[in-house]
Amino acid sequence: MADRRLILQSGLAGAATGLLGLGPAAAQSPGWPSRSVRLVVPFAPGGSSEIVARATALELSKTLGQTVYVENKPGGGGNIAMGEVARADDQHTLILGHIGTLAVNPYIYDKLPFDTNRDFKPVTLLAKVPSLYVVHPDVPAKDLKEFVALVRSKPGKLNYGSAGNGSAGHLAMEYLKMAANLFIVHVPYRGTGPQLTDLLAGRLDAASVGAPAIMQFIKAGKLRCIATGSKERLPQLPDVPTVAEQGFPGFEMTQWYGLNAPASMAQANIDKLAVEAAKAIRSVSARERLSHDAAEAVGNTPAQFAAFIAQEQQRWKAVIARAKIKPD
């Protein structure tokens, strides 16, 4: 009996040692999340980012068993929100990662109060959003070829708006400018919402915006889509040719959004979140919501998302250097 008690005690001690060896990540996993989860969107309401974030939050609230709520925190090209979330250590704060904040800002800002790769953990790539090139209906261009000809005939006389320096819309237009050798004036705004207000009012000539934010205005005839940045024509806009079809082979411009956590978040929580977030974004309701606005649901592993970010950073580092993009 004594030997059995000794064996039992040794086994329990070994199990305890094993659990301790797993560290805080494993210890925190079973009961996580224990309260509401905050999903920070680093941009103003009204853009594709909010649409993707809310579709994700709605489904995640069901699968995680805790409310996931969206909080918009615009400013500084997304850096204000990134800085705040980088410092969060409550295990219940996440941020919507974006092409601008993750792949562009590290190369247009001389100094950031955080390190994009060190201070954040990739969770999953949520969605890809094709960039649409649009003009106000008063602009006399029915397609991209006519728009390019118009801009070349009036260099510096037309303008385009964006959600801010380094935003996806800014990159998309600069990418087109480089490909087509255009001179058109950039007017940065503080978010997609304010930009769209002036675009719809005719105070801006053109813009490139993620499909979810402007599809309704294109359908209503309030904006004219002259090209899509996707590889192939969109089912939602079958009559609109891609940029590549209109004289620029190989051209592709797609925005993307992912889920990121502070580096302080336990890895076990990251792993659980990645599985649930992928389920959420691939759910029937989320896919239908995104598809309606021409966005593609993805949902992959943290390792796959990390590799994707690294690839995008290399791509845009070169474009930024060539276009000499600088912050406001």
Image: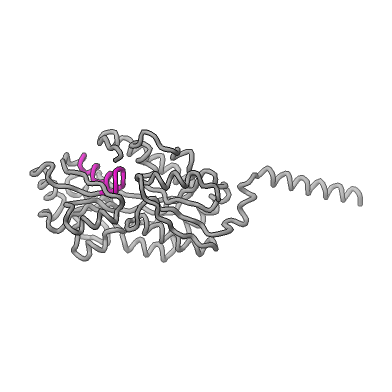
Query: In the shown orientation, is residue 74 left or right of residue 62?
Result: left
Magenta range:
162-178
Q: Quadrant of residue 295?
A: bottom left
Q: Residue at x 23, y 49 (%)?
A: 161
Asked if residue 6 shows in the view, the reply is yes
Which is more toward the observer, 84 or 5? 84
Q: Quadrant of residue 70?
A: bottom left
* In this rendering, position of residue 323 left or right of residue 301: left
Q: Is residue 223 above or below residue 27?
A: below
Tell me residue 210's x, y (percent).
29, 54
Q: Please identify the quadrant where the C terminus is shown.
A: top left
Picture coordinates of residue 178 (x, y %)? Answer: 21, 39
Furthest residue in direction right, as rendered = 1
Q: Is residue 241 visible?
A: no
Does residue 327 appear to the left or right of 118 in the view shown?
Answer: left
Residue at 31 percent across and 43 percent down: it is 166
Q: Residue 290: x, y in percent?
A: 36, 61
Task: Identify whether 158 is placed above or below 282.
Answer: above
Residue 157: x %, y % from top left: 12, 45
> Which residue is drawn at the image coordinates 24% and 42% (left, top)?
174
Residue 174 covered by magenta stretch: yes
Farthest residue toward the left? 153
